[in-house]
């Protein structure tokens, strides 16, 4: 057992602790943000617009983040920008309109250009042969720590009302973010030693940003075809899941009749299952053919996605949620491991900023990483409200069909490398 989890030290341990702290605070409120937008007077279209604004903001400096990560190092960028990320929680904590909520999300996303450095650092710090179980473990442990957060969030909203509860939770997020920033600066260790290190000051930032965009296009031109194919399929998955992501809870409340506390309870149960099986699932991913894992999980995921339109009770939704959880715990470690295995270490920061690995959670949402992935996520999220308002069943019909096609394409087009990148 000790050998299996030998990667759980140094940077991986520090990042897992920090992610766990985030999950305690953010998981309390994130599941309910779509309902909060409606509470503040927004429409269905507004939900997609608010989420898309944040996604678009994050793209602006992403090339700079990847450029700095490879040429100056990962740690300072991660630590200092975490302070900015934490400070952005204060905007929605002391305001009461969906426009200010959107402003807070915009600022928070704008400073999130340290994410490519985090991805690169995580991939650098995991041994190639343990990336499946490594990525699974670093998702499972924070999930275990924050397992009760959605239940607590649902209870707080029912007890104190949506507005008061969300304001208090954003304030909590600020304090947690400050602690996380301090931990990252103190304990994370650099993984790259580049003789052409660049020195950064405010006067050089405009030129550095321009150079990072030039390097972004150079990086894209030099990316191997097999990595471009992988990125295209992952990004397409992110797009189609984003068409639905913000509206699972909206349809569950408006059509099925669930309360916020019911949804929190659902998240608690599926979160517990996720924690129990994520690490064994990650271990299996390391031993199996990853493209087949992804392809089969995508195809299977189409079933509960379509059946969601037919359910009428909490118990039926619980069964579907459990099924989607079983696909998620295999799917995302396989995504991450495949991308890390195909990406050279010396270009990892820039490629993560350009393409990114991404992740999807059926009945949850999607996370697009890199310019391409974020663009797909932003487009899907922006369209989601308009499609839902036009027909509140259509997003799930589109997603279920897309998952089958993407699963087949993964199996047919992806070829795993004979030797994984370190």
Image: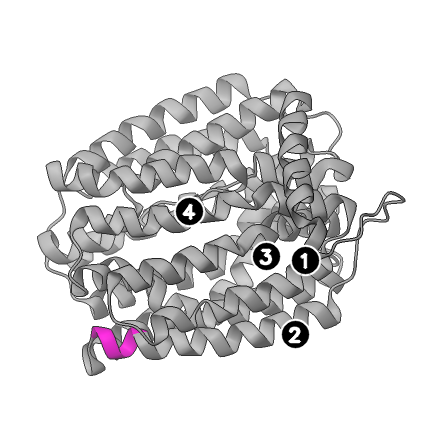
Above or below, comparing residue 183 to residue 267 in the picture: below
Marks 1 and 2, the one that precedes in the sequence: 1
Corner quadrant of residue 105: bottom left
- Reply yes or no: does residue 163 show up in magenta: yes
* CB within 8 Å, label 3 to label 4: no
> What's drawn in magenta, residue-wise?
162-166
* CB within 8 Å, label 4 to label 2: no
Gap in Å between the C-alphas at discs 1 and 4?
20 Å
Residue nearest the viewer, comparing 382 with 162 = 382
Q: Which mark is residue 278?
A: none
> What secondary structure do most residues of the magenta stretch adopt?
helix
Gap in Å between the C-alphas at discs 1 and 3?
25 Å
Q: Which residue occupies the extreme front position in the image? A: 203
Choose mark 3 or mark 4, whichever is in front: 4
For the question of whether residue 1 can be seen, the reply is: no
Marks 2 and 3, the one that precedes in the sequence: 3
Corner quadrant of residue 92: bottom left
Marks 1 and 3, the one that precedes in the sequence: 1
Gap in Å between the C-alphas at discs 4 and 2?
26 Å
Above or below, comparing residue 201 to residue 166 in the picture: above
The residue depicted at 48 percent of the width and 60 percent of the height is 276
The residue indicated by pointer 2 is: 182
Q: Which residue occupies the extreme bottom position in the image? A: 160
Choose mark 1 or mark 3, whichever is in front: 1
In this rendering, would 145 be left or right of 164? right
Gap in Å between the C-alphas at discs 3 and 4?
26 Å
Mark 4 secondary-structure assignment: helix
The residue indicated by pointer 3 is: 137
Mark 3 secondary-structure assignment: helix
The residue indicated by pointer 4 is: 55
The residue depicted at 19 percent of the width and 58 percent of the height is 315
């Amino acid at each position: 057992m000790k050998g299996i989890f030998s990667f759980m030290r140094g940077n991986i341990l520090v990042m897992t602790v920090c992610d766990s702290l985030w999950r305690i605070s953010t998981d309390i409120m994130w599941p309910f943000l779509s309902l909060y937008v409606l509470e503040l007077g927004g429409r269905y279209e507004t939900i997609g617009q608010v989420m898309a604004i944040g996604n678009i903001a994050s793209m602006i400096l992403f090339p700079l983040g990847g450029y700095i990560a490879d040429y100056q190092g990962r740690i300072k960028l991660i630590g200092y920008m975490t302070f900015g990320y934490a400070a952005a929680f204060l905007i929605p904590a002391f305001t009461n309109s969906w426009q200010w909520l959107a402003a807070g999300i915009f600022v928070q996303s704008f400073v999130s250009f340290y994410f490519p450095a985090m991805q690169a650092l995580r991939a650098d710090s995991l041994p190639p042969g343990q990336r499946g179980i490594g990525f699974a473990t670093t998702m499972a442990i924070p999930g275990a720590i924050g397992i009760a957060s959605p239940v607590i969030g649902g209870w707080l909203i029912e007890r104190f009302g949506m507005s008061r509860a969300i304001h208090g939770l954003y304030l909590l997020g600020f304090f947690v973010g400050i602690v996380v920033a301090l931990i990252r600066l103190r304990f994370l260790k650099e993984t790259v030693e580049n003789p052409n290190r660049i020195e950064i000051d405010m006067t050089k930032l405009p030129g550095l940003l321009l150079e990072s965009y030039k390097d972004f296009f150079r990086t894209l031109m030099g990316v191997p075809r097999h990595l471009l194919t992988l990125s295209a399929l992952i990004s397409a998955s992110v797009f189609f899941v984003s068409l639905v992501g913000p509206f699972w809870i909206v349809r569950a409340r408006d059509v099925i009749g669930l309360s916020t506390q019911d949804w929190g309870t659902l998240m608690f149960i599926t979160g517990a299952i996720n924690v129990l099986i994520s690490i064994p699932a990650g271990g299996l991913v390391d031993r199996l053919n990853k493209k087949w894992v992804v392809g089969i999980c995508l195809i299977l995921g189409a079933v509960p996605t379509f059946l969601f339109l037919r359910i009428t009770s909490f118990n039926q939704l619980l069964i579907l949620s459990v099924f989607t959880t079983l696909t998620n715990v295999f799917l995302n470690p396989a995504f991450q491991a495949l991308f890390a295995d195909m990406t050279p270490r010396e270009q990892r920061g820039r490629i993560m900023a350009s393409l990114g690995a991404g992740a999807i959670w059926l009945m949850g949402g999607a996370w697009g990483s890199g310019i391409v992935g974020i663009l797909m996520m932003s487009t899907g999220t922006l369209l989601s409200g308009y499609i839902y308002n036009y027909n509140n069943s259509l997003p799930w019909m589109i997603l279920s069909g897309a998952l089958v096609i993407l699963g087949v394409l993964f199996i047919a087009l992806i070829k795993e490398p004979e030797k994984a990148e370190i």
